[in-house]
Image: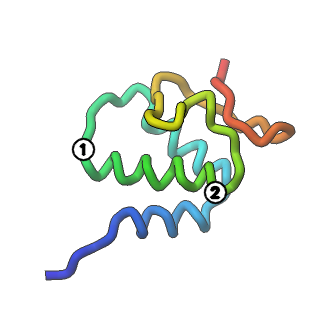
Amino acid sequence: METIDFYAKYAAEFRAAYTQSLVDTFNKSVGNYGWSSMRATLHAALIDEFVRRGIDISAIHDGKSTSFAHRVILSNEQDRLVIAE
């Protein structure tokens, strides 16, 4: 049986994606409170990619947990995520 490293798969996809695509992926999870290990893996890779790109994610992530309560937009001039109005 083949084992798939889903974190590595998601990380590679996110590394190749445009930043706006990452924001769109985040926003698709807003308000969805269902949980699974696969979603947790996707979210971990997504957050890690924002960090790798040097994007300030303090509006949604406190270093321990991530809030999916609000949609976000990318503030290009400050390279950070902000809560969408």
Left or right position of 21 against 9: right
The three-letter code of the residue at mark 1 reads Ser
Which percent across, then down, holds residue 82? 68, 28
Which element is circle 2 on? helix
Which percent across, then down, holds residue 9? 42, 68
Which percent across, then down, holds residue 74? 71, 38
Determine the CA span between mark 2 and mark 1: 24 Å
Left or right position of 8 against 84: left
Compare residues 59 and 38 and report the one nearer the observer.
59
The three-letter code of the residue at mark 2 reads Arg
Task: Give the mark toward the camera: 2 or 1.
Answer: 2
Compare residues 71 and 46 and report the one nearer the observer.
46
Q: Quadrant of the N terminus?
A: bottom left
Compare residues 1 and 58 and report the one nearer the observer.
58
Farthest front residue? Answer: 63
Against 12, is 37 above or below? above
Give the residue drawn at x 49%, y 63%: 11
Which element is circle 1 on? loop
Give the residue drawn at x 59%, y 65%: 15
Against 74, is 69 above or below? above
Q: Residues within 10 Å of mark 1 (few under 14, many from 20)?
A: few
Provide the residue designation for mark 1.
36
Provide the residue designation for mark 2.
52
Farthest right residue? Answer: 77
In the picture, the disc for residue 19 is none
Give the residue drawn at x 63%, y 57%: 52
Q: Quadrant of the C terminus?
A: top right
Farthest top residue? Answer: 85
